Amino acid sequence: MSDDSIVIFPLCPHCLKHDVAFYLRYYQRGQGKCWICFLICGHCSHGICAEIDESPEYKRNIDHNKFTRVFPEPQSMDAPPCTPQAVAEDFHEAKFNMLHGNIKSACIMAGSAVETACVQFGAINGGLKEKIKTLLKAGIVTQGLADWAQEIRGVRVDAAHQAEREATLTQRDAEDAVLFAEMLFTYLYTLPAKIAERRKSTAKDA
């Protein structure tokens, strides 16, 4: 085994650095053709375990695609499919901050992403609460989503005025805010696109 063996992974699950070099530190034969490897991130020095179907011995550079399993798996920070860029960028920033423990920034950006989505669907006037009510009246969101939206609105306001309101935000608050945003965008953008795609496919087969 060589400590010089390098694997470039698209994302470190610990520090979230993109296109980062991992260094092979240990490997052993697993079941069948499987080899179990332990690698260290060159940026944060945290480790991952990975499986590969060929011996990594004497290999200077290893293609990360050759690894069949990696633990822990990196969390995707992408917005749900078909989410417009302006909304997706705010969502990405919200999730990035959530995973890094930047609670206040995560809550604010999740709220910003939701508000941008509301505007795109015609809810222009008022604050986030009023925008959500507008979408509910128009039949764009369900009552359940509208009720849930009040929770993210409260988190976002607390984050923006934390000193004045003496609010204590938690990691759970950030996770709830990002989860709501993800579910809302799935409902607003991903599901309609999937339905339209399915209808188009059905029409061609008819």
Image (cartoon, helix red, strand yellow):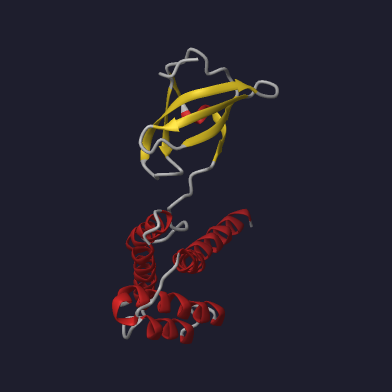
Residue 143 image point, x, y percent: 55, 82
| Total numbered circles | 0
Image spot of residue 193 (x, y percent):
50, 61
| Vertical side of 146 occupied by 36: above or below | above
- Snapshot quadrant of residue 88: bottom left
Residue depicted at x 62% and y 54%: 205
Residue 47 in percent (x, y) is at 48, 35
Question: Quick one: 174 or 78, which is closer to the camera?
Answer: 174
Q: Residue at x 53, y 29 (%)?
A: 38
Q: Quadrant of residue 128?
A: bottom left
Q: Position of residue 199 (x, y in %)?
A: 57, 61
Image quarter of the C terminus: bottom right
Q: Answer with left or right where residue 27 lies relative to residue 111.
A: right
31, 200: nearer the viewer: 31
Task: In the rendered view, tell whether residue 1 sits above or below residue 52.
Answer: above
Quarter-of-image position of residue 54: top right
Q: Is residue 94 above or below residue 114?
A: above
Taking the image as shown, residue 31 lies to the left or right of residue 92, namely: right
Return the residue nearer the eye: 182 or 167: 167
